[in-house]
Amino acid sequence: MNMQKWAWTFGIVFLLIGILGFIPGVTQEGGLLLGIFSVDTMHNVVHLLSGVIAVWTALSSAKAAQMYFRIFGIVYALVTVIGFIQGDSFLGMMAINTADNILHLVIAVVALWLGYGMDENATTTA
């Protein structure tokens, strides 16, 4: 899969997660998305913005998508470290929990690999 398709996939997933975070029933009382991940309005907005930017870069160019993953990976790595240190919030701006922190770590690793480690020239388009 090429860089733009990865960005498109990330974008759609983040947009869906951002939307689902606002839907009662999917987000349970106490702000648990799917009963696992702690979310609140700010967290949902960040997911939506991450998705919009990913889709925008996917529609732009492979270089833009690669830059998205580089920046996104670094930001999510920082969010992960701060989240593990603070525990239940990110800088007091949004709710997080251990499940969020683990997911943010996985997202950071994948994004950093896509941005820095994946050889765009070695991928094939199907």
Image (cartoon, rainbow, N blue to C red):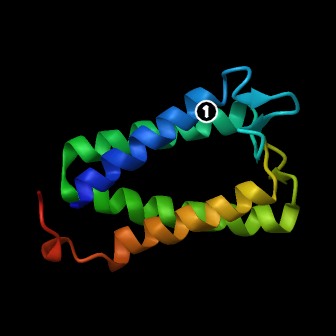
Quadrant in the rendering for residue 3: bottom left
* Residue 71 versus residue 53 in the image, above or below: below
Q: Is residue 74 left or right of residue 64?
A: right
Residue 109 screen position, x and y as percent: 52, 72
Residue 7 appears in the rendering: yes
**Going 76% across and 64% down the picture, which residue do you hit?**
82
Quadrant (top left, top right, bottom left, bottom right) of the N terminus: bottom left
Residue 37 screen position, x and y as percent: 74, 46
Q: Is residue 101 left or right of residue 6?
A: right
> Mark 1 belongs to which amino acid?
Val
**Going 54% across and 62% down the picture, which residue do you hit?**
107
The secondary structure type at the circle numbered 1 is helix
The residue to which callout 1 is attached is 45
**Going 48% across and 34% down the picture, which residue do you hit?**
15
Tell me if mark 1 has few (under 14), some (14-19) or many (20+) residues whose alpha carbon lies within 10 angstroms of its own: some
**Observer-nearest of 53 and 38:** 38
